[in-house]
Every structure is written in structure tokens, then in C-alpha cells.
Amino acid sequence: MNKSFVWGVATSSYQIEGAAYEDGKGLSIWDIYCTQPDKIFEGHSGDIACNHYHLYKEDISLMKQMGIKAYRFSISWPRVLPNGVGEVNQKGLQFYLNLVNELLEAGIEPYVTLFHWDLPYELHKKGGWLNSDSPKWFKEYTKVIVEAFGDKVTNYITFNEPQCFIGHGYSGGVHAPGLKHSTQDLLQMTHHILLSHGESVKTIRELAPYAKVGIATTALMHYPTSNTPEDIESARKAVMDEIFKSENAWPWSVSWWGDPIFLGKYPEEGLKYLEKYMPKIKDGDMEIISQPLDFLGQNIYNGYEITTSPNGEVEIVNREIGHGKTALNWPITPKSLYWGPKFLYERYKKPIFITENGLSCHDVVSLDGKVHDPNRIDFLHRYLKEFKKAGEDGVEIAGYFEWSFMDNFEWHSGYADRFGIVYVDFTTQERIIKDSGYWYKTVIETNGKNL
Ligand code: FCB
């Protein structure tokens, strides 16, 4: 990796902070959703989570011990603005200032995500992303944060995975707020989210011209079965275009979000199917949405192997029996970390950060008191090798954030899935660096030479 490559770990507010009802924090849609019966595995919630709100110093000292250079975390909007707009909760804001100060003292660079799904409940009651004021709300929130941080924070990510919170939260109904909206409503929300992103970028540029700004999107990252031009083209199409053919799958598309942001227009391939449901797009909207960004953050976990049928169609290669899987039953497909960045770089021409990549394992504390997770080491090693190769083949690779720093509240799976390279005992809040955490330290120390 080149000298400036950023080695980091990632988390998000609701998944780790806890202190859901402390120090004047307002409610988020996740606080409410978790109180509903049968929504979350065994009725878990993020009320306490990793108690990071109180243990952040200890967590940062672990990061330092592990040689971690950058930390991607998100801010709980209702912790800072309990009503989403208006009065600022100084205690909440102070928590993030303390966190940033502690990181800087430890020599760890903060990467701040403004929105990782915990929308203020008060704004939800006003219609949330359906409300045409939502870009204004997000702009106000951005201003509060950027003004408070000043030049202490020089890296911002506006949204985390709009695909996922729209797809799961407002279409599939399995994440907060648990709704199933019409396509018209979903597209209206999408447009408001894109405008919110654009307004936020403009605000950051005005208040912190020195800062680097991006977004973290996600998608399945398919890869070709062979290196023939036909298969490569089929895999590219599978990533960018094919998804629009399946009904209700479009929120998960990478181009539906990426094209407006990086290319200033919704993708033709998607419009073929979605035009009839589209909201009105006002003059100037696309300019707001396509504010120039410094980087693209992409969360990549897996994809399908793609081939070309005899008549030239995109075809999924069936996974062989016994194909490797994670504890969440996600397929292990390291090539996603080569082809994903390559396809994205070709299309958007921006330096790429992997803003999330990792896996859940059935981790246990062994008799020796340690957490041995060879599967995680093997997974990360294979994926990182592919990412490194993408860099060698011309993709501008800027950094990598392992998901996640520590085990945490994995949305509707509650605490059943452990994604951390640090183990958390959720009864005692004890942390144990897993074998993978020590391994990651060596990768960072050698700047990826040992991959
Ligand atoms: C991503 C989310 C993140 C985490 C990982 C496993 O979709 O952004 O919060 O849940 O998946």
C-alpha cells in the first residue's frame, strides 16, 4: 500500500454507545423500534450496547495498543439535537468533543459519519425523509457538528448505506422504523436523502474547507468467473444495471445513489423501470446533489460470481456445495474486494475507501482466556490481498476500515452476531483483543507488506 494508505476500524453510534436515555439524549427511531415485540433477536436493544459512552477512553486506549491509525464512528443525531433541530444538547455534543480529543491525543484520525441510521424520533413523527424539509434539517445538524469540531475533524462521511436503511427500514420493514412504503414514497425519500447529502457537503465545504468529504454506500459486489472481456462486462452489468430488473431491489443498487452524486443524474438503466414512479425533480436539485466529493467510501461484504450465457446474458454461477460462509451465513467472496473497487473507480473516478468489511464468527473465550478467530484472520487476509491487488492494477485505494472494532449490537440480530476484532462480554463489559486484532496490528505495522 502506498505511504498515505489509511488503516482503520469502524463502528456506529447506536450499535456501541448505550446511554440511550442519559444526559438529555433524544430518542431515535431505533430506540423506539427495539421496544416493539418480535422485532429484534431475543428482544435485545442498544440501550446499553458496549457502554462506549462511558468506556470510550478504554476503547481508544485499546485502539492505540492495536496500532490503529483511523477510527470511523458515527454521531447520534438525537444525542446532539434531541428534537432533530433547534436546541442543542450540550452534554451530548461534549461527549463527541471528548471522543475526538481523546482520539487525537492517541494519534488516531477521526472519520466522522453523520448518519448511520439513528434518525431522531421527533423528525420521524414529522414524516422523516418524506418531509421536503429533511434536507434543511440535515443541513442544520451538519452545521452544529462541523462548527463544534472545527479543524479537529478533517474527514466526513455524510451517510452510511442509504441502500440499507431505505431497503430494510422503509421497504422491507425489518429495520427501524419497520415500514413498507410504496415505490413512489421510497423514491421521494431517496431524492430527499440525496439532497440532504448535497446540502451537507456544501455546509462542510463552507465551514471546514480543509476537510475531505465522502459518502459510504454499499451493494453486492459481483465478480467475473473468468478474465474474458465478456465475463468482466457481465459482472460490471450485474453490479450496475441488472438489479433494476428485479422488482423492489433498486434501493440496493449502487448506481441509483452513486450516479446522481458523482455523475449528476439518475442512471438510465434504472429510469427505464422507475421513471413512472419518480418524484418531481426541481431545477438545481441535481447540482446540489452532485457537489464534488473527495472520495467514495464503499462497504463491501460479498457478491455473486458472474458468467455470460451462450446468448450473451448475465448469469449467476451457482455456488458450489460447501462454499465458505460466515456465521451470519454470508458467502465468503474475496474477489468482491478486487472487482468492486475496480468497477466503482472506472465509473466514478474517485479514490476508494473500504469503509466497512469484515464478518461475524461464533467467537468464544477459550480456556486460555483468549479469543481465537482463525476464520476471521483468513477472511480478512484474503479480502485485503484482493484490495491490494486492485491498487496495484491502477485503482486509487485510499484506506480500509475493518468492521468492526468491537462486537456490538448487530441490528435485528441483536448481540447474536459478533463482528469485532475485539471481543465484548456484554454482561461485564470486559474487552478482549481477539487473535484477529493482533493480526491486524501486524498488517498495519507492515503497511500491508505481509499480506
Ligand atoms: C452494514 C452496516 C453496519 C453493520 C454491518 C455488519 O450493513 O452498515 O452497521 O451492521 O453491515
Image (spheres, helix red, strand yellow):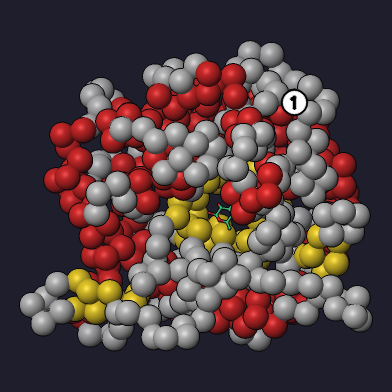
- The image quadrant of residue 264 is top left
User: Residue 127 or 72: which is nearer the viewer?
Assistant: 127
**Where does residue 403 sit, x and y in percent of width and height?**
63, 61
Q: Residue furthest left?
A: 311
Q: Residue at x 74, y 72 (%)?
A: 363
Q: Is residue 438 above or below residue 427?
A: below
Compared with 298, 38 (above or below) is above
Query: Looking at the picture, how far across and down is residue 204, in whole percent?
Result: 55, 33
Q: Which residue is mark 1?
A: 25
Residue at image location 43% in from the left, 72% down from the top:
336
Q: Type of residue at label 1?
A: Lys
Residue 268 falls left or right of residue 441: left
Vertical placement of 357 versus 283: above or below?
Answer: below
Give residue 287's quadrant in the image.
top left
Task: Assign the C terminus to one quadrant of the image.
Answer: bottom right
* Residue reaching furthest to the top: 86
Write down which quadrant ligand 1 falls in. Answer: bottom right
Name the quarter where the N terminus is drawn.
bottom right
Element at label 1: loop
Is any part of residue 20 visible from this angle?
yes
Q: Residue at x 23, y 24 (%)?
A: 280
Q: How many labels were placed on the picture?
A: 1
Q: Residues within 10 Å of mark 1 (few under 14, many from 20)?
A: many
